[in-house]
C-alpha cells in the first residue's frame, strides 16, 4: 500500500504511528481512529491477513509478517512516534512476549508505546479479583494451554516486561468487549475490582479510541488503566476525576 499520502501527513506535522496486529478487530478500529487524526499509519499483520486491511488501501503502509519477528517489527517501527500493540496470547511459543519484547527493543527511543490486554493482567497487589473471575481464568487458561491454542501466562509475562521496561509505556486493560456504535472515551481505574468497572463491558471501537488517545495523553505514561464503557451503569454511578483514582 502506498506511502505518498503518509508522507504528506508527516510533512504537515502529524504523528507517525505503527499498529502491531492491525488486521484484527481492535487493530482495524485503531487504524481508523489514527487516520481520523490525520496520523501516518504503518500496520503490521500476518501475511495471510493483509487482505483484511483492504479498506485502507492507499492510506496506510502495511508490513506483512509475524508480529514477534524482530526484523518485521524493526522495519515497521522505524521513525514512528508511537506504537500501538495488540497483545494476543496465541499458541504456546511466547507469541505475546516475543511481540512485546521486539517493540520494547526496537521502537525509537522516547516513542509512546501503548499495549492492549485483559483485566486478568495485574499491575500490583491493589488489583482485586472476584473468586468467580479467578476460577474462570484458571480453568480457561488450563484448558486453552492443554489444547495448545492459547497461553494466557504469555500475555501476563509480556506485560511484566513492559512494566519493567524503561520505555514510555501504557498498558490498557480491557473489559469484556462488544461491537456497536461509539459511546465515547471509556472511563478507567488504576485497580481491577474498583466499583466503577463493575459494568465489565466496553465497545471495541471505544477501546481502540482509548488506545489512540493514550498516544498524546502523557498522564497515562506508566499507567495500566483498566477501562469500562462510559455508559455502563457502574461508570455513570462511580466515574470520578483522574487524581482520585
Ligand atoms: N475479546 C475480548 O472480549 C477481550 C476482553 C478484554 C481484553 N481484550 C484484549 O483486546 C485485544 C484484542 O482482542 P480481540 O479479542 O478483540 O481480538 P482481535 O482484535 O480480533 O485481535 C486478534 C489478533 O490475534 C491475531 N491472531 C489470531 N490468530 C492468531 C494466530 N493463530 N497466531 C497469531 N496471531 C493470531 C489476529 O491476527 P490476524 O488478523 O492475522 O488473524 C489479530 O491481530 C487483546 O489484547 C485482548 O487481550 C479482549
Image (cartoon, rainbow, N blue to C red):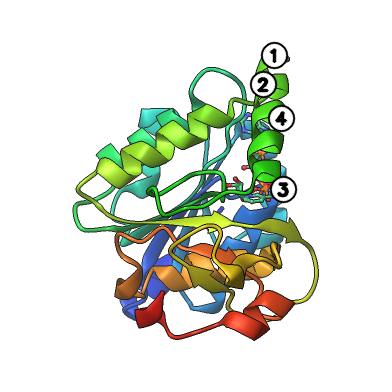
| Disc number for residue 142 | 2
**Are the residues flagged by discs 4 and 2 in contact, CB closer than 8 Å?**
yes
- Pointer 1: what residue? 146
**Are the residues flagged by discs 1 and 4 in contact, CB closer than 8 Å?**
no
Which is more N-terminal, label 1 or label 3? 3
Q: Report helix, strand or loop for mark 2.
A: helix
As measured in the structure, the alpha-carbon distance from the residue carrying label 2 to the one carrying label 1 is: 6 Å
Regarding residue 222, the answer to whether it shows in the image is yes
Residue name at image x 33 percent, y 43 percent = 162
As measured in the structure, the alpha-carbon distance from the residue carrying label 4 to the one carrying label 2 is: 6 Å
Give the label, 4 or 3, closer to the camera.
Answer: 4
Regarding residue 73, the answer to whether it shows in the image is no
Q: Is 84 or 79 nearer to us in this picture? A: 84
As measured in the structure, the alpha-carbon distance from the residue carrying label 3 to the one carrying label 2 is: 31 Å
Mark 1 crowdedness (10 Å alpha carbons): few <14, some 14-19, many ≥20: few
- Pointer 3: what residue? 52
Where does the image place residue 84, in percent across and percent down from the top left?
45, 55
Residue name at image x 35 percent, y 61 percent = 223
**Are the residues flagged by discs 2 and 1 in contact, CB closer than 8 Å?**
yes
Mark 3 Cβ inside 8 Å of ligand 1? yes
Where does the image place residue 190, in percent across and percent down from the top left?
43, 64
Mark 1 Cβ inside 8 Å of ligand 1? no
- Pointer 4: what residue? 140
Which is more N-terminal, label 4 or label 1? 4
Amino acid at each position: 500500500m502506498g506511502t505518498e499520502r503518509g508522507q504528506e501527513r508527516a510533512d504537515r506535522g502529524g504523528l507517525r504511528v505503527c499498529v502491531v496486529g492491525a488486521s484484527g478487530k481492535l487493530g482495524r478500529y485503531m487504524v481508523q481512529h489514527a487516520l481520523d487524526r490525520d496520523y501516518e499509519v504503518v500496520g503490521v499483520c500476518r501475511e495471510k491477513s493483509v487482505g483484511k486491511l483492504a479498506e485502507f488501501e492507499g492510506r496506510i503502509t502495511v508490513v506483512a509478517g509475524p508480529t514477534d519477528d524482530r526484523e518485521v517489527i524493526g522495519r515497521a517501527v522505524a521513525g514512528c512516534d508511537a506504537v500501538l500493540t495488540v497483545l494476543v496470547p496465541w499458541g504456546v511459543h511466547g507469541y505475546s512476549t516475543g511481540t512485546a519484547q521486539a517493540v520494547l527493543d526496537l521502537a525509537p527511543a522516547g516513542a509512546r508505546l501503548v499495549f492492549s490486554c485483559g483485566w486478568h493482567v495485574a499491575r500490583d497487589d491493589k488489583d482485586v479479583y472476584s473468586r468467580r473471575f479467578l476460577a474462570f481464568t484458571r480453568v480457561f487458561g488450563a484448558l486453552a494451554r492443554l489444547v495448545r491454542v492459547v497461553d494466557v501466562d504469555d500475555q501476563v509475562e509480556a506485560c511484566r516486561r513492559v512494566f519493567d521496561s524503561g520505555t514510555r509505556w501504557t498498558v490498557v486493560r480491557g473489559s469484556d468487549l462488544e461491537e456497536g456504535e461509539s459511546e465515547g472515551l471509556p472511563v478507567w481505574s488504576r485497580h481491577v475490582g474498583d466499583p466503577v468497572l463493575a459494568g465489565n463491558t466496553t465497545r471495541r471501537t471505544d477501546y481502540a479510541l482509548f488506545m489512540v488517545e493514550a498516544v498524546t495523553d502523557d498522564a497515562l505514561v506508566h499507567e495500566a488503566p483498566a477501562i469500562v464503557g462510559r455508559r455502563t451503569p457502574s461508570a455513570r454511578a462511580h466515574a470520578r476525576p483522574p487524581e482520585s483514582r
